[in-house]
C-alpha cells in the first residue's frame, strides 16, 4: 500500500472515502521518519457515521446468517488476494518482521472465516413449560451499532477480532484504529468495500482517540464498545460508560508469567519461551513479562535461553531473516531502557543486550536478558512491551503459583512442564484468561480470549466472541 508523496488517505464513511484538511504523518519506526499521511475527521463526523450505521442496522440485521457469512468470506478472500501488500504495510507502520506481518494477515483471514461460519450457530432454545397454556423460548438478537477501538501492536488482527463477530451477529460497526498504524485499517476497509458490504454496515473513522471515544460513549446510537488497549484507558471507558450503562468488552494490559519446571523438556521450554517473549518484538499484551525458573535447572535454562536470544536478528522488519523489529516510538524505547536501568540498579544481572541497537536509525533495542531480577523491579511489576526478558528463580510449585498470581493483571500465563497432574493444578490455580502449557503462542480463532482481574472484561474469539454482540431475549407465549 505504497503512497505517493502528496497523497493523503482518509476515513471510510457510509460507503464514501472522506479526506479532510487535518493531516497527520504516519511514522516508520524503523527509520523514525514519516512515510505516509492520513487525515482526521471531527467528532461531529463520527456522530454522522453512527447515524449512518443506525440506518444500516435494520437491513443488515435482517440478513440471514448465511448471507452475512458470505460477506465475511468475501472480505477474507480480498485479504488473501492482497496478503503480501498488506503485510508490507503492517511492517512499514508497525515495524514487526515481515514474516510476522504475513502471519497477522493470515490470522485475520482465519478469524473472518471462523465467524462467517460461527454466525450460523447462534442458537436459542425452547424451555420446557411448567404452566398450562404458556410456552417460553429464548432468542438471541444483535445488540445494535458497535463502536470498536483497536490498538497499534497487532493493528489488523485485533481490529478484525472486533469487526468480524459484530458483523456476523448482525451489528453494524464503526472502527477507530490507532493513528500510529492506520494504513492497514484503510486497506481492510478497501477489502470490505471490494466485498460489496452495504454502506453503513462497516465504517472506518480516523481521528483523535479521546474525541471519538467520547462520542461512542455519549451517543445513544452506539449500543456497545469493544476496546483493546491499556488498563488506564480501560478505566476511563468504564467511568464514561457508567453514565449510560453502556456495555463494554475490554482486553487490557497483561504481566504474563512463564513458569519453567524442572521436569520440562528443556529444548521445548527455551523455544516456546523465546516465542512468548520476543514475538512482535515483545509488544504484545500476552508477551511473557516475567520468567520464573525452578532453581534445579536455572543455570541450564538461562544459558540456552541467552544463546537463543543472542541469535535473534534485530533490524528493519523488511530485511530478510529479521526476528526483532523496532519499538513503536521513542517513548516506548525510553521506557524500556528505564526498566532495564531500574532492574540492574536493584541487583539484576544483565546477561545480554540492555542498550539501544548501535547504528540503527529507528527505535531499536537490543534483545535483553536480566537474570536474578528483583521482585520489586519495574519490569517485574509493570507491563514491559519490549524485548526485555527478566528471569528469577523459584523452589516449589506452590511458590511459583504464588509469584505468578502476585499481580493485578491476569491476561495470560505460560508453564513448561510434562507433569500431567501439575498441568491440571495449574489450570485450576493460575489466575489468567489463557494458560499456555509448553505453548508460547496459544491464541486460536476457535478458543475464547480475554483476561481476569484488571486485564479486562469479556472474551473475544471462540463462540464467546460472538456472544459479546448478542442480547438474550425471553419470549413468553400464551397458547390460546
Image (cartoon, grey):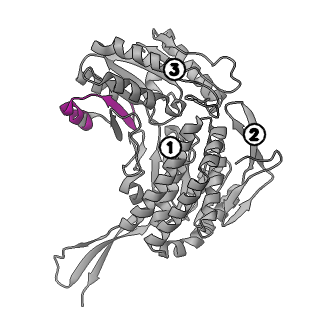
Q: Residues within 10 Å of mark 2 (few under 14, many from 20)?
A: some
Q: Which residues are magenta?
A: 406-427
* Location of residue 14 (image quadrant): bottom right
Label 3 vs label 1, nearer the camera? 3
Quadrant (top left/top right/bottom left/bottom right) for the C terminus: bottom left
Establish if 453 lies above or below 41. above
Number of marks in the image? 3
Mark with earlier residue (2, 3): 2
Q: CA distance from mark 3 to mark 1?
A: 37 Å
In front: mark 2 or mark 1?
Answer: 2
Residue 234's label in the rendered image is 1
Left/right of residue 430 with respect to residue 240 in the rendered view: left
Q: Give the CA separation, mark 2 to mark 3.
A: 30 Å
In three-dimensional space, the C-alpha distance between marks 2 and 1, rounded to whole angstroms, equals 31 Å
Residue in front for this viewpoint, 223 or 314:
314
Residue with the mark numbered 3: 311
Q: Residues within 10 Å of mark 3 (few under 14, many from 20)?
A: few
Q: Which residue is mark 2?
A: 35
Q: Is residue 126 visible in this depiction of the protein?
A: yes
Residue 194 x/y as whole percent? 63, 64
53 w.r.t. 36: above or below: below
Please report the residue visible at 47 percent of the width from the left and 37 percent of the height from the top. Answer: 285
Numbered circle sitting on residue 245: none
Image coords of residue 30 (percent x, y) = 67, 31
- Left or right? Give the position of 342 relative to 21: left
Amino acid at each position: 500500500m505504497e503512497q505517493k508523496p502528496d497523497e493523503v488517505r482518509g476515513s471510510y464513511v457510509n460507503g464514501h472515502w472522506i479526506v479532510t484538511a487535518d493531516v497527520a504523518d504516519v511514522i516508520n519506526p524503523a527509520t523514525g521518519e514519516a512515510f505516509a499521511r492520513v487525515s482526521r475527521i471531527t467528532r461531529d463526523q463520527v456522530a454522522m457515521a453512527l447515524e449512518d450505521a443506525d440506518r444500516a442496522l435494520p437491513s443488515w440485521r435482517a440478513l440471514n446468517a448465511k448471507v452475512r457469512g458470505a460477506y465475511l468470506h468475501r472480505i477474507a478472500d480480498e485479504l488473501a488476494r492482497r496478503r503480501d501488500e498488506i503485510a508490507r504495510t503492517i511492517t512499514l507502520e508497525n515495524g514487526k518482521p515481515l514474516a510476522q506481518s504475513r502471519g497477522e494477515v493470515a490470522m485475520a483471514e482465519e478469524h473472518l472465516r471462523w465467524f462467517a461460519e460461527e454466525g450460523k450457530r447462534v442458537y436459542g432454545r425452547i424451555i420446557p413449560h411448567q404452566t398450562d397454556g404458556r410456552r417460553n423460548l429464548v432468542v438471541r438478537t444483535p445488540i445494535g451499532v458497535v463502536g470498536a477501538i483497536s490498538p497499534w501492536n497487532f493493528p489488523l488482527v485485533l481490529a478484525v477480532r472486533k469487526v468480524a463477530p459484530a458483523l456476523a451477529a448482525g451489528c453494524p460497526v464503526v472502527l477507530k484504529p490507532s493513528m500510529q498504524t492506520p494504513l492497514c485499517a484503510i486497506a481492510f476497509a478497501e477489502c470490505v468495500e471490494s466485498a460489496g458490504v452495504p454502506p453503513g454496515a462497516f465504517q472506518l473513522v480516523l481521528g483523535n482517540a479521546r474525541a471519538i471515544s467520547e462520542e461512542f460513549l455519549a451517543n445513544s446510537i452506539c449500543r456497545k464498545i469493544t476496546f483493546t488497549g491499556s488498563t488506564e484507558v480501560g478505566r476511563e471507558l468504564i467511568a464514561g460508560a457508567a453514565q449510560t450503562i453502556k456495555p463494554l468488552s475490554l482486553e487490557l494490559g497483561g504481566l504474563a508469567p512463564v513458569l519453567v519446571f524442572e521436569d520440562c523438556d528443556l529444548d521445548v521450554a527455551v523455544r516456546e519461551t523465546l516465542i512468548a517473549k520476543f514475538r512482535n518484538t515483545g509488544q504484545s499484551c500476552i508477551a511473557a513479562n516475567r520468567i520464573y525458573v525452578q532453581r534445579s535447572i536455572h543455570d541450564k535454562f538461562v544459558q540456552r535461553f541467552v544463546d537463543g536470544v543472542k541469535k535473534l536478528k534485530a533490524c528493519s522488519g523488511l530485511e530478510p531473516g529479521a526476528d526483532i523489529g523496532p519499538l513503536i516510538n521513542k517513548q516506548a524505547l525510553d521506557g524500556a531502557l528505564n526498566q532495564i536501568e531500574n532492574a540492574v540498579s536493584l541487583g539484576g544481572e544483565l546477561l545480554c543486550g540492555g542498550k539501544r541497537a548501535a547504528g540503527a536509525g529507528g527505535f531499536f533495542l537490543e534483545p535483553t536478558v536480566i537474570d536474578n531480577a528483583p521482585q520489586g523491579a519495574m519490569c517485574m511489576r509493570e507491563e514491559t512491551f519490549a524485548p526485555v526478558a527478566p528471569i528469577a528463580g523459584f523452589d516449589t510449585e506452590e511458590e511459583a503459583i504464588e509469584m505468578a498470581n502476585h499481580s493485578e493483571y491476569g491476561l495470560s500465563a505460560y508453564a513448561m512442564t510434562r507433569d500431567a497432574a501439575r498441568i491440571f493444578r495449574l489450570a485450576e490455580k493460575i489466575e489468567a484468561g489463557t494458560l499456555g502449557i509448553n505453548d508460547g503462542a496459544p491464541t486460536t480463532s476457535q478458543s475464547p480470549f480475554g483476561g481476569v482481574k484488571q486485564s479486562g472484561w469479556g472474551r473475544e474469539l471462540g463462540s464467546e466472541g460472538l456472544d459479546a454482540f448478542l442480547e438474550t431475549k425471553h419470549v413468553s407465549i400464551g397458547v390460546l
